Image (cartoon, rainbow, N blue to C red):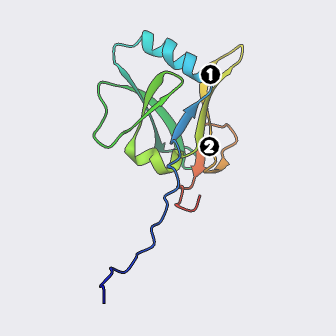
């Protein structure tokens, strides 16, 4: 009698979603901003603050941190801070232009609330089921 190993069913992993994507306008704005910067990277993250609990932040960086997620979209590379990855999964970064300002805006499926002024948000981390 031949001894055969027990077959273990294999699981197929879903493709990992891109943490952040950029609209064409946002990619162009990142290119413009980085052309004027003395630092080679732009890091996207979150911080505690504001009346809704969290704020999106963007800052220039000299180098990626070891746990940063490097995202390349539309020919632009940005860094996503490791503490923000689960909060930003599936987000789209766009640009809002008015007569008074131009700013990056986040369309985040993990956002559950925002303050009246729009400067801070409540975000729940993404889960494996999301």
Q: Nearer the viewer, residue 94 or 128?
A: 128
Residue at left offset 34%, top offset 13%? 38
Alpha carbon separation for disc pair 1 and 2: 17 Å
Horizontal side of 5 relative to 9 (left or right) equals left
> How far across and how far down the image is residue 29, in percent?
56, 17
> How far across and how far down the image is residue 31, in percent?
49, 15
Residue 36 vertical placement versus 108 (above, below): above
Q: Quadrant of the C terminus?
A: bottom right
Residue farthest to the top, as pictured: 36
**Residue at which label 1 appears:** 24
Report helix, strand or loop for mark 1.
helix
Q: Quadrant of the N terminus?
A: bottom left
Q: Quadrant of residue 91?
A: top right
Q: Which mark is residue 87?
A: none
**Residue at which label 2 appears:** 108
Report helix, strand or loop for mark 2.
loop
Examine the rendering and report whether any part of residue 74 can be seen: yes
Is disc 2 surrounded by few (<14), some (14 to 19) or many (20+) residues within 10 Å?
some
Residue at left offset 27%, top offset 40%? 66
Q: Mark 1 near mark 2, Cβ–Cβ under 8 Å?
A: no
Q: Nearer the viewer, residue 26 or 46?
A: 26
Q: Quadrant of residue 79?
A: top left
Residue at left offset 41%, top offset 75%? 8
Residue at left offset 48%, top offset 22%? 76
Q: Nearer the viewer, residue 5 or 85?
A: 5
> How far across and how far down the image is residue 6, in percent?
37, 81
Horizontal side of 113 relative to 78 (left or right) equals right
Q: Earlier in the sequence, mark 1 or mark 2?
A: 1
Q: Quadrant of residue 97?
A: top right
Residue 26 vertical placement versus 57 (above, below): above
């Amino acid at each position: 009698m031949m001894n055969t190993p027990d077959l273990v069913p294999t699981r197929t992993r879903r493709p990992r979603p891109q943490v952040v994507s950029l609209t064409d306008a946002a990619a162009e704005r990142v290119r413009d901003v980085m052309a004027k910067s003395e630092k080679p990277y732009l890091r996207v993250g979150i911080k505690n603050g504001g009346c809704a609990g969290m704020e999106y932040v963007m800052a220039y960086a000299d180098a990626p941190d070891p746990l940063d997620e490097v995202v390349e979209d539309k020919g632009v590379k940005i860094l996503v801070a490791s503490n923000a990855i689960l909060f930003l999964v599936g987000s789209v970064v766009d640009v809002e232009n008015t007569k008074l300002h131009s700013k990056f805006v986040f369309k985040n499926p993990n956002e559950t609330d925002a303050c009246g002024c729009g400067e801070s948000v409540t975000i729940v981390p993404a889960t494996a089921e999301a």
